[in-house]
Image (cartoon, grey):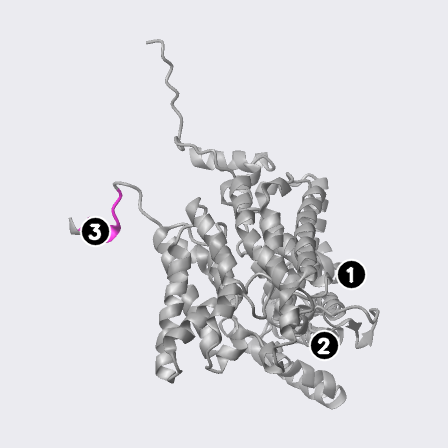
Amino acid sequence: MTDKKDKPLERIWNGIYVENPVFCLILGMCPTLATTTSATNAIGMGLSTTAILVASNLMISLLKGIIPNRMRIPSYIVIIASFVTIVEFLMEGFFPSVYAALGIYIPLIVVNCIIMGRAEAYAGKKGPVESIFDGLGMGLGFTLALLLIGSVREIVGAGTVFGIRITPAAYEPVNIFILAPGAFLVMAFFVAVMNKLKIGAARRTGWDPTENGCSDCSSCARHSVCGGKKAVSGEEAGMKEVQA
Amino acid sequence: MDTVYNVSPSPHVRDNITTQKIMGAVVLSLIPASVAGVILYGMHALLVLVISVASSVLSEYVFEKITKRPVTVYDLSAVVTGLLIGLNMPPEVPLFIPVLGSVFGIIVVKQLFGGIGQNFMNPALGARCFLIISFSSQMTDFAVKGGIMASSAAAMDAVSSATPLAALKTGAAYPLGDLFLGTTLGTIGETSALALLIGAVFLLCIRVIDLRIPLSYIGTFFVLVLITAFIRGYEAPFYYTLCEIFAGGLMLGAWFMATDYASSPMTTKGQLIYGVCLGILTFLFRMVSKSNEGVSYAIIFMNCLTPMIEQFTRPLAFGIKREKEAKHE
């Protein structure tokens, strides 16, 4: 049952890099954009989501034989909501400042699409141990992504990281980065870097751009500039489709 | 039968107009406003304009070199963007602000979306909004230290150091002559309606822009403000409405920024819809919301809606009928 893809270390690496929930799957955008105003908030959000993800993945994986297929979504939500309530009370008791800063986004973890997505795509089909590591990998990937976005936004937008001032006094904070538009700018920047890394690596191993939905050059915004010269194979593929 | 006919697909009619010529004309048309700004606000204003243009051109050049694309600085579009960013700055702004704005406008708004013609938003306005959100205190500090406004500033009392728009917000009228000539406080290029209109007439005469967007924009805004002035019972509603039109960034925005080719609709009907919506939005921002100015936000908002407007107003090719009409026959 356990093949190479389900080894614990592979699951963790998969969650952090190969299928990073924020930068590759573009899941969980609401907490990603809203709670990364500072590095502290980002860590708080990331770790609480990780805890819930691991616990709910384990529970769903254990109960997968009992839950009827038709009733799985409501059952998943009940399981996830229970863990969210536990985490919410723990945070309120032990980290009241982070709890106050995150506000509505803690209860909203119930409908976090990373957790629902992993329950549906992984934990509902695989064994409990793999599911724990899958949740751990995805959660760590989410936490790291949030931490990256949150740190950059806090440094540029406020001149601090974890509340400690690290920029010289002459530095004028660029306020927009701790407001909503800054979240989109930083997020887009990291997605671009991630794509650059992955596509570069894929090209070196002989990857064909037509396999990734780029088969039709004419729909590309850059078509008028490059004239289809950059991806000749893609253009040819498009031509074949027209002829057929 | 010796003649060889050249059979080719369209376009069959060509013109010798180039991007460089159009952008050059826009730069020329902005010269009166720039000169007026320097006369009014002194040498620091000139420095701001020069720095904005230089940093825009430099960021375009460096970005295109790094990404190995064709260098397009000679088409002068970066000069226009830089000049517009400079004209949107307060006269005594710290110099790092226009530099940051130019880098953002050129690299993020223009180049990352594919360079000239591909930007979904006017780069200069994108930069202006970026700066207003980031450095609101510096961007709304219209203190003057040079030029003819500094010498007359001593004569002005503390109250009049507010911008005309702030004064108009209270419902009181403002001297229209000052607004027309530009002897008020505001950004470098927006205050002198006279200088801006000279440039706009020049652009109209050589047909770089047409009247559809600016007139529908200003006309809608005029009608809405006039009605509101009557309803609210302001003294001299006509005079008040004229003040609103010549104050703030409306002249600069309507003639030079809303008419940007890449980010405004191409179809005639679309341009009219775009202009009317701009008028409504500017009216809402200025007269209904709490803020004094709303031209920049109105224009970038409509820039984002431009693809949708174009989709709904796409003209039909000759001989093709819409489905409804075809069914009737």
- Which residue is under mark 3? B325
In the depicted view, which residue is nearer to us: B19 or B310? B19
Residue type at mark 1: give it: Leu
Q: Quadrant of residue B88?
A: bottom right
Given this view, does label 3 or label 1 mark the residue nearer the observer? 3
Chain of residue at mark 1: A
Span colored in magenta:
B320-327
Which secondary structure lies at badge 1?
Answer: helix
* Badge 3: chain ID: B
The Cα–Cα distance between marks 3 and 1, rounded to whole angstroms, is: 65 Å
Question: Can you see residue A15?
Answer: yes
Q: Quadrant of residue A80?
A: bottom right
Q: Is residue B310 above or below residue A232?
A: below
**Structural distance between the alpha carbons of marks 1 and 2:** 27 Å
Main secondary structure along the magenta-highlighted residues: helix
Where the N terminus of chain B falls, by quadrant? top left
Q: Magenta includes B81?
A: no
> Sequence order check: which comes first, mark 1 or mark 2?
1
Q: Nearer the observer, disc 3 or disc 2?
A: 3
Give me the C-alpha separation between circle 3 and circle 2. 59 Å
Q: Is residue B31 above or below residue A64?
A: above
Give a yes or no on whether discs 3 and 1 share a subunit: no
Q: Amino acid at mark 3?
A: Glu
Q: Position of residue A143 (x, y in %)?
A: 73, 69
Given residues A5 and A157, the one toward you in this image is A157
Residue A21 in view in this figure: no
Kindly identify which numbered label has been placed on residue A41.
Answer: 2
Q: Is residue A55 left or right of residue B19?
A: right
Q: Chain of mark 2?
A: A
